[in-house]
Image (cartoon, helix red, strand yellow):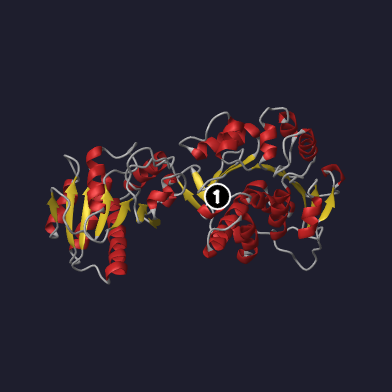
Amino acid sequence: MRKAWRVADIRSAEDALMRTLPDGTLMQRAAAGLARRCAVLLADRFGGAYGRRVLLLVGAGNNGGDALYAGALLARRGVAVDALLLADRVHEAGAAALRRAGGRTVHSVPSTVDLVVDGIVGIGASGGLRAEAAEAVAQATGAGEQKPAVVAVDVPSGVDVDTGAVEGDAVRADVTVTFGALKPALVVGPAVLHSGLVELVDIGLDPWLRGDPAVEVPDRADVEEWWPTAGPADDKYTRGVVGLATGSAAYPGAAVLSTAGALAGPTGMVRYAGSAAQAVQARYPSTVVAARAADAGRVQAWVCGCGIGTDEAAKGELRTVLATKVPVCLDADALNLLVDGSMAPLLRRRHAATVITPHDREFARLAGEQPGRDRVEAALRLAARMNAVVLLKGDRTVVATPDGRAYANPTGSPALATAGTGDVLAGLIGSLLAAGLPGPRAAVAASYVHGLAGRKAAESGPPTADDIARALRAVLPL
């Protein structure tokens, strides 16, 4: 599990580490990692770094110093390095090192640039780029017949580091070389799209990071470790039975898609309860059907809400599900039925896991406000208020827990922005809950695999939810 840390935590760790090292050691470590990555990128694009032209966009802070020292290292390898200074005061020792190595400072963007290094502002900045810097970025990244590669130092300049918000002009990098630890802007929010490929350079910070990270990011190994697998002594009951109170006569597809998601997971049996039973059983004859949740029989987890409507019958089904003592996943119409607060007593009395899966509009109805610029904090507030695991859907889906932990899913794909994919996800979460996975891990693992399926399905063109459901089997087992 990778961890991303807030600016205050990074600053505190850096201060503690620097007190144990000679002056300038951290900047030299960062610059060495930055120069190495720039050289690799030039070699990948042009077959080598020698003779290529690199432009440093240099601001007043330490990121500008990192860029200048890295430029000096590149210049010693035969790279033509220019530094465009965007502040009255820059890192003097770094600028001197660049000049000694054969680099130079310039007052305008050269006509030919192979690679741009963004060292304008660092993790202490806020808001978008100032006009002069934004203009320099626009000129530099459009220089020459072939657009140059862009490498950001630590974070792309202009993004909000702690939230991942982008509220003005910001650099769009092909690669971000970040130092010591990940920052939230590199893993969540619109800033992710500005970061490109993220490479973490170890500068010795890990032992000095204290407290809890702002957000954690699962890796494939985490999901593989969590994913339930059947043993030789298991049967369909011990693998877990998931109940689905989904779909309706008006929306039978929601029932079919949630069933597809559930069957792709590790559960041993699916029990469907609702008025779309005929459609479900026609597609998936192994499913056991009933007219109502109360008549479905024993299950280890419930999924409720996808396409059930908001009439009195739907309310009754939701009440039945919430009154059980097993984990539940609530999606779509179930979330709309929670808005008026009439189900709040049932939610408060629950001891088993509750997972809710809102998109932004559903979140706004539940929380009374949009997620806003800090999606992690917004999800955490709702999780605490509802005593539920909140899976806030988005390009980088956020999973927040009532006890204050947050996760960002790295496998998001635009392919998932199509009708019915949420039904598939809800079914998969329910299957994992029924197989015994705790609520947070079920939400994180399902989101991760769902994202992989979206990418797989998109290989053949824009996919439907049905394509994504089928692709789940192509990416499982991990």
* Residue 38 x, y percent position in the rendering: 29, 61
Image x and y of residue 298, in percent? 84, 49
- For the point 52% across and 64% down, the residue is 459
- For the residue pair 52 and 280, the one nearer the viewer reads as 280
Which quarter of the image is occupied by the C terminus? bottom right
Q: Nearer the viewer, residue 318 or 459?
A: 459
Residue 19: give x, y in percent of width and height.
32, 45
Name the residue that disc number 1 marks: 417
Estimate the x, y position of residue 169 in percent, counting from the top left.
32, 41
Give the residue at x 22% y 62%: 74
On the question of residue 245 being in view, the answer is yes
Mark 1: which secondary structure?
loop
Give left or right: position of 344 versus 170: right
- Residue at 63 percent of width and 48 percent of height: 422
Report if residue 270 is visible in the image. no
Report the number of numbered marks.
1
In the drawing, does residue 19 fall left or right of residue 261?
left
Q: Amino acid at mark 1?
A: Ala
